[in-house]
Amino acid sequence: MIFSKTLNHWYSNNNRELPWRQTKDPYFIWLSEIILQQTQVRQGLPYYHEFVQEFPSVNHLANAQESDVLKLWQGLGYYSRARNLHATAKYVANELNGEFPNTHKDLIKLKGIGDYTASAIASICFSEATAVVDGNVYRVLSRYFGIDTPINSSKGAKEFKKLAQELIDVKDPATFNQAIMEFGATQCKPQNPDCSICPFNTSCIAFAENRINELPVKIKSANAKKKHFNFLVLISSDEKTVLEQREGKGIWQNLYQFPLIETNKGYDFEAFKTLAKNHSLLKDKLFELSLYNEADIIHKLSHQHLHTKFWIVKVDGDLENGISINKVHEYAVPILIGNFIESFNFD
């Protein structure tokens, strides 16, 4: 088809040199795809290099401690990706003798691998003609064909997958899949694409109808919930602090944080001091309280916005289960906590 030939020709002249494009080893392709979910290449590339250096094979990753994997992942967000990455590495290493499945049907059974990632690995590593559909592909196809079906609807997912499958170059699915993703990332960009140099500008419906900024269509999600997080940064007389590991399900599962008091509203200094006195770590202790940030630090997640304050609590005496303040950098923490640790300078 003319579409795939034009796309592949564009890719041969415009593709970026990226390390995972120099290999067909499924471990490295899988690793890159998991890192790049919800993450741009420029942000994910340093993480990819660090993971490859620290864990050069699926067996190395499988034998790692989860805390080490989470620490290396710190800053990428969506920590379930890291936990699934580790779980799948252990499964491949221990149950599949270190060999990844070679078909989309079997790859998609692995934890953390959906249709897109399974298609990427199957096509790039094993030449299976199964089309990838990610945000970049949705954008390219919706604009070129003028499709206004919402991309985050079940109808849209099926429609775009079917279309991508019809367009794929069955003789060279690896190049086609990488080309359409690259085209969406660097040419048919979300904002202000340069349509004057686009090889499809004479046949693109969105360009012809001046609808570039309208496509793709996405159903708006419900408003994010507002939460108030108050972290107690305890510092004892012998320069120790407390980090607690989060338990249960959630995006920060198994990560560490300072003791947290979650409230349904913001508190002024005196009101919060009264609240803090009742915390189990501070009962019957003398302490001096100060507020690190007057304005809330707002940390936006997909489903909630965290309005955060860090309260510095200098405690007279020791702390149960305290750790040396110069050890806080060694723990895997959410980026919100990590940014505070860097700015506060515990050393």
Image: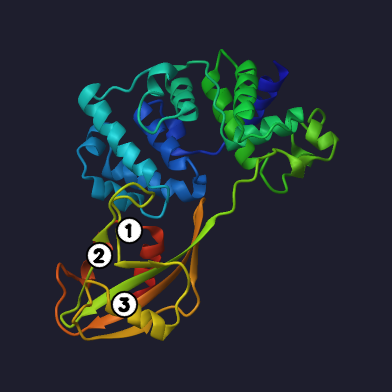
Q: Residues within 10 Å of mark 3 (few under 14, many from 20)?
A: some
Do tag 3 and tag 1 residues touch (Cβ < 8 Å)? no
Residue 223 lies, in percent from the top left, at 59, 53
Q: Which residue is mark 2?
A: 243
Rendered residue at 32%/58% (across/down): 333
Residue 234 lies, in percent from the top left, at 26, 75
Amino acid tagged 3 = Ala
Amino acid tagged 2 = Leu
- In the rendered image, the vertical position of residue 258 relative to residue 49, given as above or below: below
Q: Which residue is mark 3?
A: 276
Amino acid tagged 1 = Val
Rendered residue at 48%/24% (across/down): 119
Whole-angstrom CA distance, mark 2 to mark 3, is: 16 Å
Rendered residue at 35%/70% (across/down): 231
Nearest the eye: 303 or 18? 303
Q: Which residue is mark 1?
A: 333
Residue 27 lies, in percent from the top left, at 34, 30
Using the rendered image of the protein, determine whether residue 346 is visible from the camera's viewpoint.
no
**SS state under label 1:** loop
Do tag 2 and tag 3 residues touch (Cβ < 8 Å)? no
Quarter occupied by residue 232 = bottom left
Is 62 placed left or right of 203 in the picture?
Answer: left
Whole-angstrom CA distance, mark 3 to mark 1, is: 23 Å
Q: Residue furthest right?
A: 209
Give the mark nearest the N terminus, 2 or 3.
Answer: 2
